[in-house]
Amino acid sequence: MNTQQQEFLNQYLRTLSPIERAAIPQCVAEHFCADEYNANECARLINEGIKTATCSLKAAYDIDDEPLPAIGRLSVVLNWAQEPVCIVKLVDVAICPFNQVSSDFAALEGEGDRSYASWYQAHREFFTHFAASIGVAFTEQSDLVLERFEKVFPL
C-alpha cells in the first residue's frame, strides 16, 4: 500500500474504536478487473453502492498457496491509476462452481445490464483467458470464490 492509499485507510480506521480496529483480519489495496476501463468502472459502481460482490477463480488461490479472503477484511478500492476511491468490508465468502452461481449473485456484481446472461458471458470469457494465463483449464465446474462486501468509507 502506498502512502496515499495508507492515509485514506487511516482516515477510516480513525473512526473505529480500538476493539473494532483489532477485529480487522487484513487490509489490502486493490483495483478490480484487469484493464483500465473496467477497473475504473468497477470502482465507480462500488463507490455508488451498485456493485456489492465480486468473484475470482479459486485455482489462482490454490496455485499461489494463498488463503481465501477473510470476512472482515478491508479493501481500499483503487481506480486504474492506483488512487483510492472508497473502502469496502468483506461480509461473506463462499465457494461455488461457475455453473451454479445464482442470478441473484450475478446481479450483485452490478456490471453490464445486471442480468445473469450478461454476467455469464463476460465471466466465462474472462475466466477462460485468465485460467489459461496461469496454466489451468477453466470449465463450467471450476470453483469460484464468491465475495460479498459493503462500502464503509466514505459514507
Image: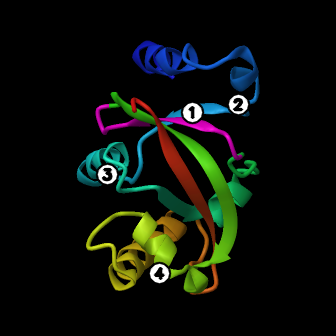
Between disc 3 and disc 4, whose residue precedes?
Answer: 3
Q: Amino acid at mark 4?
A: Ser
Q: Nearer the viewer, mark 2 or mark 1?
A: 2
Between disc 3 and disc 2, whose residue precedes?
Answer: 2
Residue indicated by mark 1: 28
Q: Quadrant of the C terminus?
A: top left
Q: Residues within 10 Å of mark 1 (few under 14, many from 20)?
A: some
Q: Position of residue 52 (x, y in %)?
A: 46, 55
Residue indicated by mark 4: 103
Q: Marks 1 and 4, Cα distance to the nearest angstrom?
A: 28 Å
Q: Amino acid at mark 1?
A: Val
Tell me which residue sits at (51%, 23%) in the image: 1
Q: Amino acid at mark 3?
A: Leu
- Residue lying farthest to the left in this orientation: 37
Q: Amino acid at mark 2?
A: Ile
Helix, strand or loop at mark 1: strand
Between disc 1 and disc 4, whose residue precedes?
Answer: 1
Q: Position of residue 24 (x, y in %)?
A: 70, 30
